[in-house]
Amino acid sequence: MSVWFITGASRGFGLEIARAALERGDQVVATARQAAAVEKEFPGDPSVLAVALDVTDPAQASAAVGAALDRFGRIDVLVNNAGRGLLGAVEEASDAAVRAVFDANVFGLLSVTRAVLPVLRRQRSGHVVNISSVGGFTTGPGWGVYGATKFAVEALSEALHGELAPLGVHVTVVEPGYFRTDFLDASSLHRADEEIADYATTVGSMRAVADSRNHAQPGDPRKAALAIVSVVGSPSPPLRLQLGADAVGRVSAKLDFVRDELSRWRELSVSTDHG
């Protein structure tokens, strides 16, 4: 039996992962800004500890970890799922909007991870699952700032993988494509206040795509949660896990592009060495 510590567990991926873990017979520390939102989903379940957690508050993160240890005695799986989106051209995004999405997606993830890692290191076992996005590997117009936060999550995860592997702790960064959650709702996805006409054909068209795909995305969150739970149960889990055919297609295309560009410019690139 494993103990899962999941952020953003009141809806979307976080809620589905919590359900899948419970079905496996595990115990779950389900955190959200409002603990009542979690309690509503799991009324009276003794295998669930609902904890209020604003991931951007390091003191709350430490308190949540303490509550988890008091209740279950250990933490085996950390799922950094809480976050927010931002849709808009890089130039359109205000400083406040950029900072807000970085606070949630990067600094919040760091706060929770720093609070949990001493437990995993002491146990010499565990698994950190960071929910990124296919936009953390390849991004495009309208998603620059959001993608930048997820690129940061990818870098942190890759470094953590190397740092924690000798200590018996696995790290997996998950790269979902479009899934049928409420991510494209205003409650999760914030939009730049300014719209610059010169970006109408690029970012403007992406705004239209987001509107048309909302609650019509191809990915099934339930299947995604089961895939994540299965990876955590694997003796050799991947560093990166793409979810959804769209994510696999976009990652494959990016790899092809980088490989081709590297080949075309290789001679100039290597000419800069001494000698």
Image: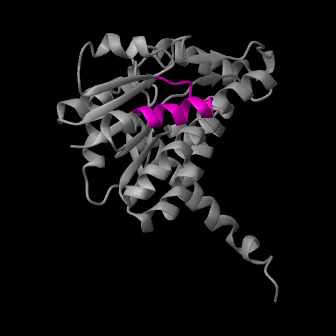
- In the image, residue 59 lies at what x, y percent? 60, 32
Q: Is residue 244 visible?
A: no
Indicate left or right for 90 with 237 as reference.
right
Rendered position, 162 above or below 43:
below
- In the image, residue 252 lies at what x, y percent? 45, 50
- In the image, residue 48 lies at what x, y percent? 29, 25
Rendered position, 61 above or below 41:
below
Which residue is at 33% across, 55% downward?
237
Q: Quadrant of the C terminus?
A: bottom right
Let me know if residue 53 is in the magenta part.
Answer: yes
The quadrant in which residue 267 appears is bottom right
Which residue is at 26% across, 31% downward?
223
Let me know if residue 209 is in the magenta part.
Answer: no
Nearest the viewer among 53 and 262 is 53
Indicate left or right for 26 with 34 as reference.
left
Which residue is at 50% across, 39% downward?
132
Instruction: Specify the segment rendered in magenta.
Output: 52-67
Which residue is at 80% across, 25% downward?
95
Q: Quadrant of the N terminus?
A: top left
